[in-house]
């Protein structure tokens, strides 16, 4: 019955070619689909059993799909920062939501895999591709850059907030001129440091030497001075015989009657004047230079604290008031008012120093600022941050303290200063010497200190405490070469602090790191995109939207992949249109040939039937 077998075989051939045509049409239809992997068709012959080889005949045919998942598509650049493409082996880990609850996606926990990298941030802060698959990865600590675990999870970047980071390190690189252009050098006595363009300690106020003698001056710390128990009135009034001690908290006590309109108290050069009750300033108003005589003790002390940076305190058991220097400067309070004496202090009061040493070593006071600026050059400025994220303008200046041009025993030496108080007055410290002698050799290279960094202790600018700062100079970062302008050339001045910030946008870099741009100008790592690979890549089960599911033949997903992620890129379809058109022609011809076999077999059967007639 070979004729009828031929008919069946031809029908099988038509089915196989139809199967091939279906795959070809699908490949052509997805020629522009992102990350699409074409499906090829393989044909397999079906040979009927035969007892002897010489009686074996050609059998039928069946068609199978052959995946080309491992075949790379063309990678092209994109302007979308969250798009990404994989070059080489690997798949993005994704999940598809099963529904939503309170507008938040709900997931089944089943991970799928895709090469389709057209991810964008949705309203909930997830990275979702155009097929609806949610990207997975490992969150990263934005401050340290270290991954937070190793198990991929659906990424979400909604309302990410980073707390402030205090400045701890300054990166600095500069060239100091061999001969600085200081104003004093042209008129200075020959053979002196000022004639060589440097700083002369003798030009500064006695008792305040801008140079560090011996060990660096300690940073300012809080020093106090306490008055005797005060005889302030209490509210409500009580009978006062020999005087009633101040008790309780300051706002509950009124000012002594010894204060009169026009009395003044001078705190660190700032005068506080007492006014009458008819003044337009309401009681307790935040006017740092006036106090009404009907104000409370607390009002006066808070205004003193606003000037010093640290409010005075009261011993509730004795009524004694303690003044604080704070951590920025010395404290000077003067008054000739009887009320001030009644509060427990003498007519003229000078408090202890807050620090810096009794000789004022390494300190430039406000009265000496003009001379200091004439004998020093700018070293640049940088915005640094305290622990709360408050921005602080850190000004630097360099002063040449010794010069090799002065002869034997001298070397080119510089001191670095920072501005401690931009609003300093009188004897308040305005600039602080960092306490290190920077010495240069004849070749202009830094010879001392040895190493790439120094520590600047106890840095405080105004009322903002920054603590110890590390100044990193790097290798060859600080030099002394001749400069025509006589100014410092600052090549780099950076720091590692920042204010708190809110997430503004995200993008993916070429290392597969999701980087967030924050309102404080910081670009910080938020997550690492996870990749997986398989031993049997082409045996994955294709799902809608360019995703794949694990099968027994593919094996389980293996974390990591040799492929490389390219940010702002997309992988296109791996379909070759020319190749598909060639297959289309061959398939059409094969299909037509099978129909001819059916026609021929039918004619032969008709001839056979005609024999019987």
Image: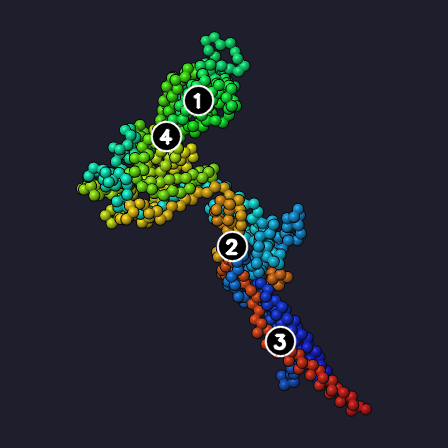
- Residue 250 shown left or right of residue 425 in the figure: right
Mark 4 vs mark 3, CA separation in Å: 90 Å
- Residue 76 shown left or right of residue 591 in the figure: left
Mark 2 vs mark 4, CA separation in Å: 51 Å
Residue 249 percent across, percent down from the top left: 50, 20
Of labels 4 and 3, the one closer to you: 4
- Tell me what residue is drawn at x 52 percent, y 55 percent: 81
- State the SS at label 4: loop
Q: Which residue is mark 2?
A: 508
Count residues near mark 1 (Cα–Cα under 10 Å), then give few for <14, some for 14-19, many for 20+. Answer: some
Q: Which residue is mark 1?
A: 273
- Tell me what residue is drawn at x 28 percent, y 41 percent: 182
Q: Quadrant of the C terminus?
A: bottom right
Q: Quadrant of the N terminus?
A: bottom right
Which label's residue is closer to the chain start, 4 or 3?
A: 4
For this rendering, which residue is in front, 223 or 366?
Answer: 366
Q: Which residue is mark 4?
A: 425
- Tell me what residue is drawn at x 59 percent, y 66 percent: 32
For this rendering, which residue is in front, 495 or 47?
Answer: 495
Q: Is residue 178 above or below residue 300?
A: below
- State the SS at label 3: helix
State the residue lying farthest toward the left: 408
Q: Is residue 400 above or below residue 301?
A: below
Q: Which residue is mark 3?
A: 584
Of labels 2 and 4, the one closer to you: 4
Of labels 1 and 2, the one closer to you: 1
Q: Is residue 498 above or below residue 133?
A: above
The colour scheme applied to this rendered structure is: rainbow
Mark 3 vs mark 2, CA separation in Å: 40 Å
- Tell me what residue is drawn at x 60 percent, y 62 percent: 546
Res 443 seen here: yes
């Amino acid at each position: 019955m070979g004729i009828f077998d031929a008919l069946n075989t031809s029908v099988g051939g038509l089915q196989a070619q139809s199967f091939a045509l279906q795959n070809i049409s699908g490949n052509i239809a997805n020629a522009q689909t992102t990350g699409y992997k074409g499906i090829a068709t393989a044909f397999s012959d079906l040979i009927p059993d035969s007892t002897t080889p010489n009686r074996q005949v050609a059998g039928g045919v069946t068609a199978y799909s052959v995946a080309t998942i491992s075949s790379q598509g063309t990678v092209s650049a994109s302007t979308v920062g969250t798009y990404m493409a994989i070059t080489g082996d690997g798949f993005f880990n994704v999940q598809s939501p099963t529904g939503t609850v309170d507008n938040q996606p709900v997931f089944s926990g089943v991970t799928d895999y895709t090469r389709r990298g057209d991810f964008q941030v949705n309203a909930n802060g997830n990275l979702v591709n155009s097929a609806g698959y949610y990207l997975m990865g490992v969150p990263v600590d934005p401050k340290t850059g270290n991954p937070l675990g190793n198990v991929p999870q659906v990424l979400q970047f909604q309302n990410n907030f980073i707390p402030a980071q205090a400045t701890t390190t300054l990166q600095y690189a500069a060239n100091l001129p061999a001969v600085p252009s200081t104003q004093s050098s042209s008129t200075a006595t020959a053979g002196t440091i000022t004639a060589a363009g440097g700083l002369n300690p003798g030009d500064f106020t006695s008792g305040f030497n801008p140079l560090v003698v011996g060990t660096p001056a300690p940073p300012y710390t809080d020093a106090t001075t306490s008055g005797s128990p005060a005889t302030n009135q209490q509210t409500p009034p009580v009978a006062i015989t020999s005087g009633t001690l101040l008790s309780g908290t300051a706002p509950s006590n009124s000012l002594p009657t010894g204060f009169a309109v026009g009395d003044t108290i001078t705190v660190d050069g700032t005068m506080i004047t007492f006014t009458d009750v008819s003044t337009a300033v309401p009681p307790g108003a935040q006017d740092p230079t006036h106090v009404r005589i009907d104000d409370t003790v607390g009002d006066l002390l808070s205004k003193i604290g606003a000037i010093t940076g640290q409010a005075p305190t009261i011993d509730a058991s004795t009524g004694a008031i303690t003044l604080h220097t704070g951590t920025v400067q010395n404290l000077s309070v003067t008054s000739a008012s009887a009320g001030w004496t009644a509060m427990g202090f003498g007519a003229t009061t000078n408090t202890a120093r807050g620090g810096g040493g009794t000789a004022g070593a390494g300190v430039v006071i406000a009265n000496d600022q003009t001379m200091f600026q004439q004998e020093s050059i700018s070293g640049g400025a940088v915005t640094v941050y305290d622990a709360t994220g408050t921005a602080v303008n850190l000004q630097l200046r360099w002063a040449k303290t010794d010069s090799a041009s002065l002869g034997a025993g001298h070397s080119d030496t510089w001191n670095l200063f920072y501005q401690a108080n931009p609003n300093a007055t009188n004897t308040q410290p305005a600039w602080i010497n960092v306490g290190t002698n920077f010495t240069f050799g004849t070749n202009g290279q830094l010879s001392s200190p040895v190493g790439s960094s120094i520590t600047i202790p106890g840095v405080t600018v105004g009322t903002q405490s920054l603590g110890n700062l590390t100044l990193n100079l790097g290798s060859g970062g600080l030099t002394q070469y001749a400069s025509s302008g006589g100014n410092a050339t600052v090549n780099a001045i950076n720091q590692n602090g920042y204010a708190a910030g809110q997430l503004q946008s995200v993008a993916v870099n070429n290392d597969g790191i999701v980087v967030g741009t924050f309102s404080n100008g910081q670009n910080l790592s938020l997550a690492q995109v996870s990749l997986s690979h398989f031993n049997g890549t082409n045996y994955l089960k294709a799902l809608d939207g360019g995703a794949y599911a694990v099968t027994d033949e593919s094996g389980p997903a293996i974390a990591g992949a040799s492929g490389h992620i390219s940010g702002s890129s997309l992988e296109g379809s791996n379909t070759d249109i020319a190749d598909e058109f060639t297959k289309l022609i061959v398939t059409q011809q094969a299909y037509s040939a099978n129909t001819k076999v059916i026609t021929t077999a039918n004619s032969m059967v008709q001839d056979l039937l005609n024999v019987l007639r």
